Amino acid sequence: MARAATTSDAFNAVAEPRRREILTLLVVREHAVGEIVAALRIDQPSVSKHLRVLRDVGLVRMRCQGRQKLYQTNAEAIRPLHEWTSTFERYWSHQLNRVKERAEAKMNRGAEFDPTKKEK
């Protein structure tokens, strides 16, 4: 089965680790391309290419300030990604709670019988 183009939707776009790094950086505040290049130590053509993909699927917005292009995340477009990953967050929280409950139950059973203590 052929893989979908990275520009087809947000899920395909964030499959690329460098794009996730860029999104993580842009969560804090908007950045110019040069700032992204410096912060992530990626060459400028690659950053521009990744930003283009993220922009095409709507995950980032761009505004011009003079000759500078500033990028920021588009929270509304990220919402479907968040909602989908939240499913797994709930799953892992549930699993971790089960592990915790089992460990606590085992500790409580162990406290009932302590072979180092002598019975009177």
Image: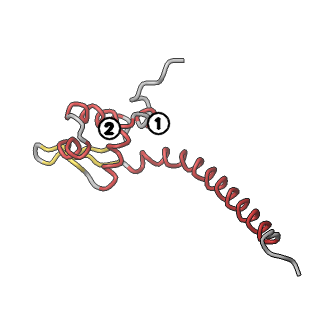
Secondary structure beneath dot 1 equals: helix
Whether 120 is drawn above or below 103: the answer is below
Query: Is residue 94 left or right of 28 when viewed as pictured?
Result: right
The type of residue carrying mark 1 is: Phe
* Residue drawn at (26%, 46%) of the image: 71
Task: Point out residue 82 in the picture as x, y percentages from the top left corner.
Answer: 49, 48
Q: Residue at x 70, y 57 (%)?
A: 98
Q: Foreground residue, 76 or 51? A: 51
Q: Position of residue 31 (x, y in %)?
A: 23, 49
Residue 88 point in image, percent of width and height: 59, 47
Give the residue type at disc 2. Answer: Arg
Q: Quadrant of the C terminus?
A: bottom right
Q: Secondary structure at mark 2?
A: helix
- The residue where tag 2 is placed is 55
Q: Residue at x 39, y 37 (%)?
A: 17
72 over 4 or under it: above or below: below
Looking at the image, how many numbered discs can be counted on the residues?
Answer: 2
To which quarter of the image does residue 20 belong? Answer: top left
Q: Along the line of sight, which residue is nearer the eye, 1 or 59?
A: 1
